[in-house]
Image (cartoon, grey):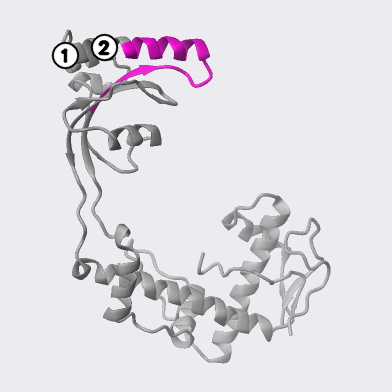
Amino acid sequence: MTQVTGHAAPARATRPDEVSVNGVIISRAEIAREIQNHHATTPAQAWHAAARALVVRELLLAEADRLDIAARPAAHPDGSRETDEEATIRALLEQEVKVPTADTATCRRHFERHRASFRTDDLFEVAHILIPAAPDDAGGRAEARATAQALIAQILSGEAAFEAMASAHSACPSREVGGSLGQIGRGQTVAEFEAALSTMAPGSVHPTPVETRYGFHIVHLAHRIDGRDLPFEAVEPVIAGHLELTSWHIAVRQYLSLLVGRAQIRGVAMDGAASPLVQ
């Protein structure tokens, strides 16, 4: 049974005098070095996250020692090598944590439930003219909007070509190529710009200035290539990898819960503590 001294809340403001796992002391110096790997709202929360991570490490290394698992460090693709501790923990988990292989039927069920995720992105061939204005400059934004509206009127009436207006008025470096941004996909622009593109017909200029934090944009959509649904056969390996990794995360958490449950842990609460291996 896990034993915890001090307060039970993991985010407490005070630190215990000593953290130990089955009598093995985890020093304050070790915890201080580990803190850099944990982002938290407060220093106390970071301290406790670091302490819990070191408790998990000690539990895993002790279990590997009990099972006589030896370290065989592997090389990483970048040429570096695992530490002995990393290799030992990896070997332990490979031996003790087993997850089923995702078969074709399971992958297909996932595919059918998430069809929208397995589609190529829409592509837009776009040009724009940026009339800049700072977000907190009300007067400047009003002036920029008026300028953009006037330019749109000239372009739509045929008085001026879009490319010429971009070269003369845009604050974006794309003015050097007539405002062209080339082909862009979903998520490559700010939300307001993307929303405007989704309503436009190819070959059109947006009838009103598109407002973003950068100012006001005059948007021309030259072409649009709609995304297409990907066939199941093309994405089955990706789905299988995702399902197996998710299952592995769950299995590791359950395995760690078993180790925590039969250990004597003092100085830090482990309830709800996530493994540093499965963030």
Residue at 55%, 76% (x, y): give it.
Answer: 253
- Looking at the image, residue 34 sits to the left or right of residue 162; the answer is right
Residue furthest bottom as drawn: 67
- Looking at the image, residue 123 sits to the left or right of residue 149; the answer is left
Q: Are marks 1 and 2 in contact (CB under 8 Å)?
A: no
Please name whichever residue, 181 or 151, is drawn nearer the observer in this view of the structure: 151
Residue under label 1, please give it.
161
Residue under label 2, please give it.
153
Determine which of the numbered discs, if any, sits on residue 212 in the image: none
Disc 1 is placed on an element classified as loop
Instruction: State whether residue 76 is above or below residue 95.
Output: above
Q: CA distance from mark 1 to mark 2?
A: 11 Å
Q: Which residues are magenta?
A: 127-149
Is residue 31 among what the camera can see? yes
Residue 118, position in %: x, y?
27, 60
Tag 1: amino acid: Ala
Residue 138, position in %: x, y?
52, 14
Residue at 49%, 21% (x, y): give it.
Answer: 135
- Looking at the image, residue 78 sits to the left or right of residue 11; the answer is left
Picture quarter containing residue 15?
Answer: bottom right
Is residue 30 among what the camera can see? no
Instruction: State whether residue 5 is above or below residue 145.
Output: below
Mark nearest the camera among 1 and 2 is: 2
Residue at 59%, 74% (x, y): give it.
Answer: 57
Q: What is the number of callouts on the image? A: 2
Residue 145 shown in magenta: yes
Residue 60, position in %: x, y?
57, 80
Residue 21, position in %: x, y?
70, 78
Please name whichever residue, 238 or 57, is drawn nearer the observer in this view of the structure: 238
Picture quarter containing residue 193?
Answer: top left
Tag 2: amino acid: Ala
